[in-house]
Amino acid sequence: MTHKFRKVLRNYDLYLILLPTIVYFLIFEYWPMYGVQIAFKNFLAMKGIWGSPWVGFDNFLRFFHSFYFWQLIRNTLLINVYVLIFAFPVPILLALLLNQLPSLRFKRFVQTVTYAPHFISVVVLVGVLSLLLSPNHGPVNNLIQLFGSKPIFFMADPSWFRTVYIASGIWQTAGWSAIIYLAALTSINPELHESAVMDGANKFRRILHIDLPGIMPTVTILLILNIGSFMTVGFEKVYLMQNPLNISAAEVIQTHVYKTGLLQGKYSFATAIGLFNSVINLILLVSINKILKRMGKSSLW
């Protein structure tokens, strides 16, 4: 009996606790990969997955040569680039500012107010956006008209789609996302701040030279995870915000897969698109992890 096996036996109770998680991932994450093969087949429900004829890369080539291919790629990339530029830094800034608040009661109040929107349903959020931004009775357009400008149909204008999507996403998720950075800030040795104060460093310099470097490993890991899902946009919110007028900016890969696969019944074609999207995400994840590891930063492996 090997040493490792004896170690497992000694800690069998810990492995039993881990067992439900392993079973969950095997059933709901790994077993469904069996169906990915239909991306390379002309799937026919009557013949099943094994009985459907192979078509090789025809589904992928069909997607690459489609007239909407570059539009889907462009919309998906632009939304994620804007999220990375504008939404990703906000929780970091919020956590750094909250950490400097001297009043614990006020700090808790701000935290509660900022992370409460996280619990709002996406359906409710989009409904609220439609009411707030309505060109007829919405308070935002009422304010715009008060200053002498014409009302803007935000939810139907393709040029405003990404702005509304990103801004509402920041409002809903910034407070919740800041919690992990606040937790990382608590691990910073207070003596570093005490020494900096004695040396005459103000709050800004302490944030810049103590707090920010202290949470940088956490920032790096979350950045890797964000880039690893770079081609994935929140399906529910994008789909609910779509309408025939803004579809040119709102149609992304995830919504197209849903419409093609479930609504039109083109299962093989939709699976090929989804697999292409997943492969791009995997390449980005491995690449950014390798780059940051070479730079001496934190990495996933």
Image: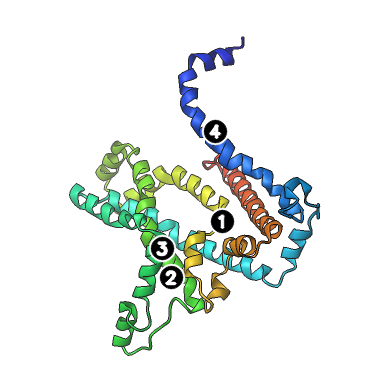
Q: Name the spot of residue 139 as percent of width and height, x first.
A: 30, 78
Q: Earlier in the sequence, mark 2 or mark 4?
A: 4
Q: Secondary structure at mark 3?
A: helix
Q: In front of the other: label 2 or label 3? A: 3
Disc 2 residue crowd, few under 14, some 14–19, many 20+, Cα 10 Å:
some
In the depicted structure, whether residue 34 falls above or below residue 20: below
Q: Name the spot of residue 104 as percent of width and height, x first.
A: 20, 47
- Asked if marks 1 and 4 touch (Cβ < 8 Å), the reply is no
**Real-space Cα separation, disc 1 to disc 4, in angstroms:** 28 Å
Task: Please report the residue visible at 50 percent of the width from the left and 34 percent of the height from the top.
Answer: 21
Disc 4 residue crowd, few under 14, some 14–19, many 20+, Cα 10 Å:
few
Q: In front of the other: label 1 or label 4? A: 4
Q: Amino acid at mark 4?
A: Val
Q: Amino acid at mark 1?
A: Phe
Disc 1 residue crowd, few under 14, some 14–19, many 20+, Cα 10 Å:
many
Q: Which residue is mark 3?
A: 123
Q: Earlier in the sequence, mark 1 or mark 4?
A: 4
Asked where in the image residue 62 lies, by quadrant, the reply is bottom right
Quadrant showing the C terminus = top right
Q: Which residue is mark 4?
A: 23
Q: Which mark is residue 164?
A: 2
Q: Earlier in the sequence, mark 3 or mark 4?
A: 4
